[in-house]
Image (cartoon, helix red, strand yellow):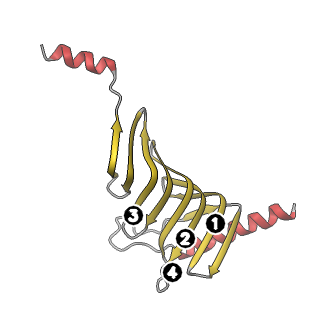
Amino acid sequence: MSKQCCRNSLLIIAAVFLVAATGAKTGSLNSAREPVVITSNRMEAAKLGDKVTFIGNVTLKKESMTLSSDTMIVFYDTGSKDIRQIDAHGNVIVHKEGRVALANDASYYSGEEKIVLTGDARIIENENQLGGKKITLFMRDDRSLVEGGKVLLYQDKREQTSRGTNSK
């Protein structure tokens, strides 16, 4: 029971620390602070306020996005203490509004609100898939940039039939 209590205490401390360190972005339409909550099996702080490493079953939740991985390293801006960058490694999964992105590694850049996926990177939406060497997800604009990749799209047969009928 003490292990569970210790783990829960670490998670609460990490969540409070991350919420306190996450500042409102200038130029953002919503000036309210959005909390970032990270849970994991273990947390290590190398230099308090500079870098925190989360290890084992890591899950990050921010607004409508969930990012999970084996390990996650959170880097803070030394001056403002805002989150500058988050690196995720191993079995990376990003869920956002009906889309799933998978990769071996990912880096989230908070200033630009983008996620760069590398290592067998792919996006799945319904039956459609995008894959590439590198996929950049622009969170603000809800768009993606796929580099060195391929696309697999499925078209509904009824849609194909109706298009064929209309063109006669």
Separation of residues labelled 4 and 2 (CA atoms): 11 Å
Element under disc 1 = strand
Element under disc 4 = loop
Label 4 or label 1, whichever comes before in sequence order: 1
Separation of residues labelled 3 and 4 (CA atoms): 17 Å
Label 2 or label 3, whichever comes before in sequence order: 2
Separation of residues labelled 4 and 1 (CA atoms): 18 Å
The disc labelled 2 sits on which kind of residue? Answer: Val
Which label was assigned to residue 112?
A: none
Which tag is nearer the camera, tag 2 or tag 3?
A: 2
Separation of residues labelled 2 and 3 (CA atoms): 15 Å
The disc labelled 1 sits on which kind of residue? Answer: Phe
Q: Would you identify the image quadrant in which residue 41 lies?
A: bottom right
58 to 166, vertically: above or below: below
46 to 133, vertically: above or below: below
Task: Mark 2 and mark 1 in contact? Answer it, CB < 8 Å.
Answer: yes
Label 3 or label 4, whichever comes before in sequence order: 4
Residue sitting at 58 percent across and 64 percent down?
Answer: 72
